[in-house]
């Protein structure tokens, strides 16, 4: 059947018994080549039921035994319709995330080739630099995270479908805000978010510039350039983020054409990954600024010390 209510249910036949299975026989050997199909082709068969019959007739569907139906296909599942992926971080430590990830399968979806959902955090919607957060069996449309440590700023959550042969090639995704990523105290007001630094000072880059060469709105392409500080001995790398304001609110990491977000010391520019979307970690807050951060062995400098420039989208 299509769902747990036996919607569009189709009776399966045993190779020996023509119709019903007699009491004392506790299995059914399905005819070879039986199609996995309900009585309405638009609704795929996702469930198997075993009903008990009595003189009063067929038992109610809520009392029948049932399991999810898995259809062995010898390959990983295709992407299925999922929507409304949501998550709010409740951990105040930067690089630590906690809370409930939830998603909603489409109203009509074929789950026959799926056994699990897998959730990852990633640097971008394409799944780059991803870290596995956990997996749950199909039928469970949420994953509770309990203070998971991430190794980088990973503002995207991706939900894949899996089976024993692997996971889907693509995922559905949503952006979220790491509550404590900047090691800062964040204060939300009616109109803006301000950040108060709690880390030590580090001399930042200057003369940040960017010229957009992509003609499409909300898409970035071009070179971000900057002048390094006079002393670079403490610096281990640079990163470039786009953000809502000068305080790096809802900042999102940008990648170069090589797919990497880390820029080595001595390299004072980055050619942005072609077609980078101009979008912060919260779509309600547009990306208006570019910030270039210096990093040391202690972490990333504060937004107030970073080099920055207003972002113009041609």
Image (spheres, rainbow, N blue to C red):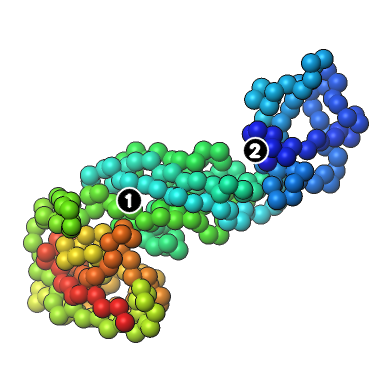
Tell me what residue is drawn at x 40 percent, y 38 percent: 144
Counting from the top left corner in percent of width and height, residue 237 is at 23, 68
Q: In which quarter of the image is residue 63?
A: top right
Give the alpha-carbon distance from disc 1 to disc 2, as whole Å: 37 Å
As drawn, 31 above or below 211? above
Q: Which of 18 and 164 is in front in this view?
A: 18
Observer-nearest residue: 105 or 152?
Answer: 105
Between 118 and 202, the residue placed more toward the observer is 118
From the top left corner, tell me how far across and down residue 207 is, in percent: 15, 80
Q: Which residue is drawn at 34% across and 38% down?
A: 146
User: Which residue corresponds to the image point at 91% horizontal and 31% vertical from the top-left?
Assistant: 18
- Judged from the image, the secondary structure of the residue bearing numbered disc 2 is loop
Residue 117 in the image: above or below residue 249: above
Secondary structure found at label 1: loop
Of the numbered discs 1 and 2, the one sitting upstream in the chain is 2
Graded by Cα atoms within 10 Å as few (under 14), some (14 to 19) or many (20 or more), the crowding at tag 1 reads: some
284 horizontally vs 259: left or right: left
User: Which residue lies under the disc numbered 2?
Assistant: 3
Instruction: Give the quarter of the figure containing the C terminus.
Output: bottom left
Estimate how packed mark 2 is, as few (under 14), some (14 to 19) or many (20 or more) residues with alpha carbons within 10 Å. some
**Residue 41: x percent and y percent?**
74, 50
Q: Mark 1 points at which residue?
A: 150
Instruction: Name the image quarter holding residue 1.
Output: top right
Check contact, mark 1 vs mark 2: CB within 8 A: no
**Residue 132 visible somewhere in the drawing:** no
Q: Left of 67 or right of it: where is 271?
A: left
């Amino acid at each position: 059947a299509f769902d747990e209510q036996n919607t569009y249910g189709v009776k399966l036949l045993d190779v020996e018994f023509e119709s019903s299975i007699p009491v004392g026989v506790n299995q059914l050997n399905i005819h070879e080549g039986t199609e996995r199909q309900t009585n309405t082709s638009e609704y795929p068969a996702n469930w198997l039921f075993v009903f008990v019959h009595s003189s009063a007739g067929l038992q109610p569907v809520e009392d029948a035994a049932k399991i999810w139906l898995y259809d062995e296909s010898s390959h990983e599942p295709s992407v299925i319709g999922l929507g409304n992926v949501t998550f709010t971080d409740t951990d105040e430590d930067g690089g630590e995330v906690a809370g409930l990830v939830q998603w909603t399968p489409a109203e009509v979806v074929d789950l026959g080739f799926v056994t699990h959902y897998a959730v990852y955090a990633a640097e971008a919607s394409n799944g780059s630099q991803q870290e596995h957060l956990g997996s749950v069996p199909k039928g469970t449309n949420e994953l509770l995270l309990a203070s998971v440590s991430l190794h980088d700023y990973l503002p995207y959550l991706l939900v894949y479908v899996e089976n024993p042969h692997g996971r889907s090639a693509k995922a559905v995704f949503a952006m979220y805000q790491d509550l404590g990523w900047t090691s800062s105290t964040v204060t939300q007001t009616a109109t803006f978010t301000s950040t108060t630094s709690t880390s030590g000072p580090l001399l930042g880059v200057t003369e940040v510039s960017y010229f957009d060469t992509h003609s499409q709105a909300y898409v970035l392409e071009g070179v971000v350039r900057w002048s390094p500080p006079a002393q670079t001995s403490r610096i281990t790398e640079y990163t470039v983020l786009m953000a809502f304001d000068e305080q790096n609110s809802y900042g999102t990491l940008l990648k170069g054409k090589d797919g990497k977000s880390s820029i080595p010391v001595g390299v004072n520019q980055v050619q942005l990954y072609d077609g980078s979307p101009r979008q912060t970690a919260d779509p309600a807050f547009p990306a208006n600024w570019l910030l270039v951060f210096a990093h040391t062995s202690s972490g990333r400098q504060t937004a107030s010390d970073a080099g920055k420039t207003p972002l113009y989208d041609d």
